[in-house]
Amino acid sequence: MISEMNGIYYDKVQVSIFLADDVTDEQRAAIETRLKQSDEVKSYLHESKEQAYTRFQQQFKEQPELVQNTPADALPESFRVELKNPERYAVIAAAFPNGQNGVDQVRDEGDFLDRLFSLLNGARNATLAVAVVQALAALLLISNTIQLAAFNRRNETNIMRLVGASRWYTQLPFILEAALAGMVGGLLAVGGLVLTKVLFVDRTLAGPIKAGIITGIDWGQIAQTGAIITVAGVALAGIASYVTLRLYVRL
């Protein structure tokens, strides 16, 4: 969701030139002329106070109390400018100084997006760090469990070795047992993903998703991620058990 939101929002990033309440027709026309003549501007759109309020009502229609408590003239008139290169915001800011010639404020949406996605990326990185720690803990747990299981069944495995069973043949039941446990863990994780989508994404986030503020998660993504989790769980458990048996257990 974070990656898709990043692409969507940064592709639509704009510079907003908010006009003062006492802006004159001459000042407004002068601003528009300079925007037309600027080599930095890809396109622009003039938005009146009425249009700004209508857009505000559409964006926050899921929050009627906020709309009702916001006066119709609370939102300023503005020019919404799309730049050829969003990183050249400073050029536009310098061309239209705040508080001069009818301009109240020039705001770059990219600054807000940078802060927002910095926070979201930090949360994602923290989640990945926790996942890595959990994976290492799982490896240690699998290793200890396999060693205990092999120790508890040492009589059976010794008899198998005495009658000519190969090392691989005696190790295989332990590896399959670990792989089965890994599969069960993967399926439980998939169940957690399904519950998260149904109870949190599809319900709690239904409003922002419907309004286009954030992107949704479809069942295809859940299925793909679930398959990766399950396969990784089986592989992780199987490989960890095999390495443990080879290094620490004599069968």
Image: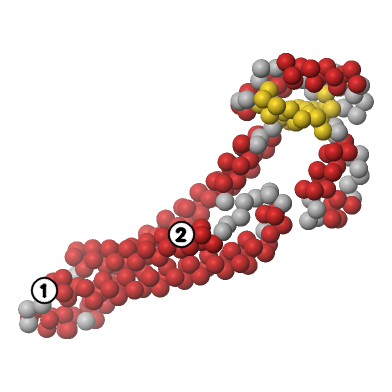
94 sits to left or right of 73? left
Q: Amino acid at mark 2?
A: Gln
Question: How far apart, in angstroms, are the residues tagged by discs 2 and 1?
Answer: 38 Å
Q: Amino acid at mark 1?
A: Ser
22 sits to left or right of 176? right
Vertical placement of residue 170 versus 73, above or below: below
Q: In this rendering, does residue 165 appear at all?
A: yes
**Element on which disc 1 rests:** loop
Residue in front for this viewpoint, 59 or 128: 59
Residue in front for this viewpoint, 97 or 222: 222
Of the numbered discs in the image, which one, if any, rests on residue 166? 1
**Residue 105 occupies quadrant:** top right
**In the rendering, at what x and y percent does residue 203 appear?**
67, 64
**In the rendering, at what x and y percent does residue 44 appear?**
74, 27
189 sits to left or right of 163? right
54 sits to left or right of 212? right
**In the rendering, at what x and y percent does residue 231 appear?**
37, 63
Vertical placement of residue 45 versus 73, above or below: above
Instruction: Name the residue that disc number 2 marks.
Output: 224
**In the rendering, at what x and y percent does residue 29 appear?**
85, 19
Q: Residue at x 24, y 81 (%)?
A: 152
Mark 1 crowd level (few <14, some 14–19, many ≥20, 10 Å Cα) = few
Q: Residue at x 61, y 25 (%)?
A: 85
Mark 2 crowd level (few <14, some 14–19, many ≥20, 10 Å Cα) = few
